[in-house]
Image: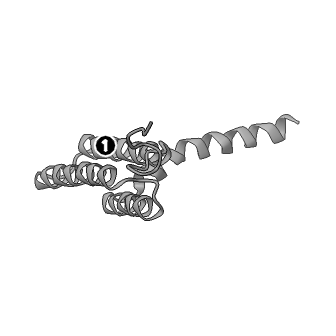
Amino acid sequence: MKKILIPIVAVSALAAATVPAVASAQSINQRQDMLERRIDMGVRNGSLSRSEAYRLRGDLRQTARLEAQYRRGGLSGWERADLDRRFDRISAQIRYERRDRDYGYGYGNGPRRY
């Protein structure tokens, strides 16, 4: 039993160590494109209002400007990690906004009529 358990634990530990590396291996441009597609999809299916999408796209543009600024002097490890954190935050905001059921005027959120 020990002979089987030790290799399984070793493979599991190795796989767990490589998952964060794979997540950060995605290029910055790919992450920007993916986030932009998620925003577009949210607007198309109605889960994001236009104002929410406008604000999220503004956050994405601001991060792209910061990336350009970082790239002028060469992208260091800290700068890459900072951009990854910012993209993670934007991704979480998109997830939250798409699920908050805030559809704008005319979907039960307008003024009450008595």
Residue identified by numbered label 1? 86
Amino acid type at image mark 1: Arg
Q: Position of residue 35 (x, y in %)?
A: 38, 57
Q: Residue at x 83, y 39 (%)?
A: 3
Identified at 42% across, 42% down, the residue is 109
Q: SS for tag 1?
A: helix
State left or right for residue 20 relative to residue 59: right
Which percent across, then down, holds residue 98?
A: 46, 49
The answer to whether 5 appears left or right of 35 in the picture is: right
Q: Compare residues 2 and 61 and report the one nearer the observer.
A: 61
* 100 shown above or below 31: above
Q: Is residue 113 above or below residue 44?
A: above
Callout 1 crowding tier (Cα within 10 Å): few <14, some 14–19, many ≥20: some
Q: Quadrant of residue 54?
A: bottom left
Q: Which residue, as the protein is rendered here, is positioned at the far front?
A: 114
Query: Residue shown at 60%/46% (left/top)?
Result: 15
Question: Which color scheme is applied?
Answer: one colour
How far across and down, in percent of the image, does residue 4 sit? 83, 42
Quarter occupied by the N terminus: top right
> In the image, is 47 to the left or to the right of 66?
right
Q: Position of residue 97 (x, y in %)?
A: 42, 45
Please state if 113 lies on the left or on the right of 86 as rendered: right
